[in-house]
Amino acid sequence: VGLGYAGENLDYNELRLWELTPVPVRGVGAKASGHAPDFLKTLATEIIPFVERAYRTDPAHRVLAGSSLGGLFTLYTMYTQPELFSAYLAAAPAVVVENDWLLGYEEGFAKAKRALPVRLFVSGGGNESPGFLSGTLRLNERIKARQYPGLAYEFRIIEGERHSGMQFESYTRGLRFVFAPLAPESGPSP
């Protein structure tokens, strides 16, 4: 299920900042950003129940995927309500928002000694801005060092791609990883 915005002549950057950032972003302000907790609540209490009533789904195999600010929201959701989804796919997550706020949030999660029984795929573009990519690399090192109980984790740099160009390959590889237990890949028949 893909979530979008209704209407015409919308400012998608403004809408994404409003609902996908967990904390207010300097220069934008609290009224225009920092509403991820509200969006997560809506997702958990309204959108997921609606989808599961209207469509044939398997609640044991929900996946949340997002890119850039959507990747930030995906990781925020994982550290806030890891049980809401069985797998998370964060393509080029905007870890650097508000001076790596997400890394501090992850630190709190780790100190609480919570398990993380999910499948997580994180990626970055090899030709992304070095400042942006550095946040994703710091997150990768942190996750690898934590060795969270129950976590199945894969990280990939999509070589030769910039921020937007890496998304297609990230989603393809990420979905293959998160669904591997349900549909293991097999090679060609002999």
Image (cartoon, helix red, strand yellow):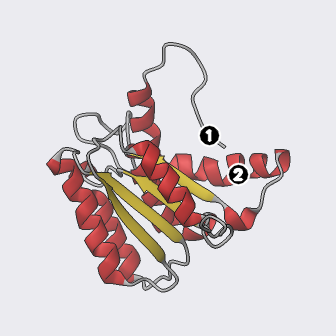
Quarter placement of the C terminus: bottom right
Q: Which residue is mark 1?
A: 2
Residue found at x 61% / y 23%: 6
Residue found at x 51% / y 51%: 172
Q: Residue furthest toward the top? A: 9
Taking depth in this image into account, of 48 and 65 the one nearest to the observer is 65
Quarter placement of the N terminus: top right
Image: 6 above or below 165: above
**Numbered circles on residues, count:** 2
Residue found at x 48% / y 86%: 149
Q: Which residue is mark 2?
A: 48
Amino acid marked by disc 2: Ile
Taking depth in this image into account, of 80 and 172 the one nearest to the observer is 172
Q: Quadrant of residue 84?
A: bottom right
Amino acid marked by disc 1: Gly
Is 98 placed left or right of 31 in the picture?
left
Q: Nearer the viewer, mark 2 or mark 1?
A: 1
Taking depth in this image into account, of 8 and 145 the one nearest to the observer is 145
Are the residues tagged 2 and 1 within 8 Å (C-beta)?
A: no
Dot 1 falls on a residue whose secondary structure is loop
Whichever of labels 2 and 1 marks the residue nearer the N terminus, that label is 1
Let me know if residue 174 appears in the view: yes
